[in-house]
Image (cartoon, grey):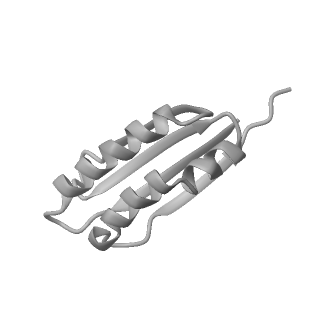
Amino acid sequence: MYISHITFSIKDGEQNVFEDTVSKIVQIANAFPGCKYFKISVLVNEPTKYFLYEEWDSKQDADAFKASKERNDAVAHVASIMAAAPVTVGYTVESK
């Protein structure tokens, strides 16, 4: 299993654009092969910061999603409203 979390900072006033676009990305991800969980939340005390948590069957599945045209078209739409580059942390979970 592969788990990733990403923190996004959005320019003030652009939250609606970001949320509309990200809702499409969430739908695409949840229908993508290997996706176990994909959800984004806004930080309560900082309405321009968002937290994405995702779980995949494998890192290869996550990478295939990240390379998909549908995902990349949507991501390109929000690139100009980012206040800073997203911060990503990924983990590979080995079962014993």
Residue sticking out furthest to the right: 96
Residue sticking out furthest to the front: 69
Residue 71 image position (x, y, % from top left): 45, 53
Residue 73 image position (x, y, % from top left): 40, 60
Residue 69 image position (x, y, % from top left): 49, 56
Query: Which image quarter: residue 13?
Result: bottom left
Q: Residue at x 17, y 53 (%)?
A: 16
Left or right of 37 on screen, residue 25:
left
Q: Residue at x 37, y 42 (%)?
A: 40
Q: Is residue 66 above or below residue 78?
A: above
Left or right of 57 on screen, residue 12:
left
Query: Which image quarter: residue 41?
Result: top left
Q: Nearer the viewer, residue 26 or 83?
A: 26
Residue sticking out furthest to the top: 96
Q: Quick one: quadrant of the N terminus?
A: top right
Q: Residue at x 66, y 43 (%)?
A: 61
Q: Quick one: quadrant of the C terminus?
A: top right
Left or right of 41 on screen, residue 90:
right
Q: Is residue 27 above or below residue 19?
A: above
Q: Residue at x 70, y 46 (%)?
A: 59
Left or right of 16 on screen, residue 21:
right
Tell me how many marks there are: 0
Q: Nearer the viewer, residue 33 or 23?
A: 33
Q: Is residue 66 above or below residue 83?
A: above
Query: Which image quarter: residue 14?
Result: bottom left
Residue 94 image position (x, y, % from top left): 80, 35
